[in-house]
Amino acid sequence: MAVVGWLQYLLFFVFYLAIFLASGWALVDALRRPAGAFVAQGKKTKAFWGTILGIAVVVAFIATPFPGGINVGGIFNLLALAAAVAALVYLFDVRPAIAVYRRPGGGSSRW
């Protein structure tokens, strides 16, 4: 039974770590894009996405059950799912729409 519990813990850790990393990636990407790109493509503003994704990163960090640490559980687990949704919406809807825009002086690199 202890092995099953350890595997469950490991799966939860990997799941919430993935949410944290996706939220962080989305936040960094959003902050690197020019503000005009969001409005030009009919998406919410850069400030909106920066705020939503910043909150998502914090919530995902708190919800991640660290080894030997305290698992806050409860509402933060539910909020971490909302953080995942926010990150996925940005990464699969907003990011492709604004990908053609680069910051001034951004060079030839796509990233």
Image: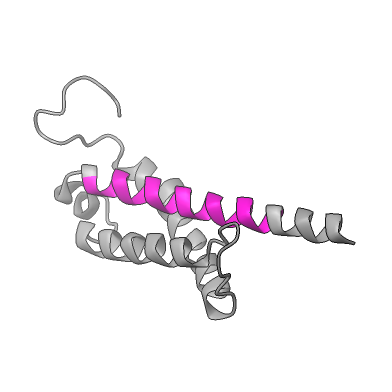
Looking at the image, the residue that sits furthest to the top is 108
| As drawn, 86 above or below 96 | below
The x and y percentages for residue 75 are 54, 80
Look at the image and give the residue range highlighted in magenta.
11-31
Looking at the image, the residue that sits furthest to the bottom is 75
- Protein image colouring: one colour
* Residue 1 placement, left or right of 87: right
Looking at the image, the residue that sits furthest to the front is 68
Residue 12 covered by magenta stretch: yes
Q: Residue at x 43, y 67 (%)?
A: 59
The x and y percentages for residue 29 are 31, 43
The x and y percentages for residue 11 are 70, 53
Quarter of the picture containing the C terminus is: top left
Front residue of 22/13: it is 13
- The overriding secondary structure of the stretch rendered in magenta is helix
Q: Residue at x 56, y 70 (%)?
A: 70
The x and y percentages for residue 15 are 62, 54
Front residue of 95/56: it is 56
The count of marks equals 0
* Residue 50 placement, left or right of 104: right
Looking at the image, the residue that sits furthest to the left is 105
Quarter of the picture containing the N terminus is: bottom right
Residue 71 covered by magenta stretch: no
Question: Which image quadrant is residue 108 in?
Answer: top left
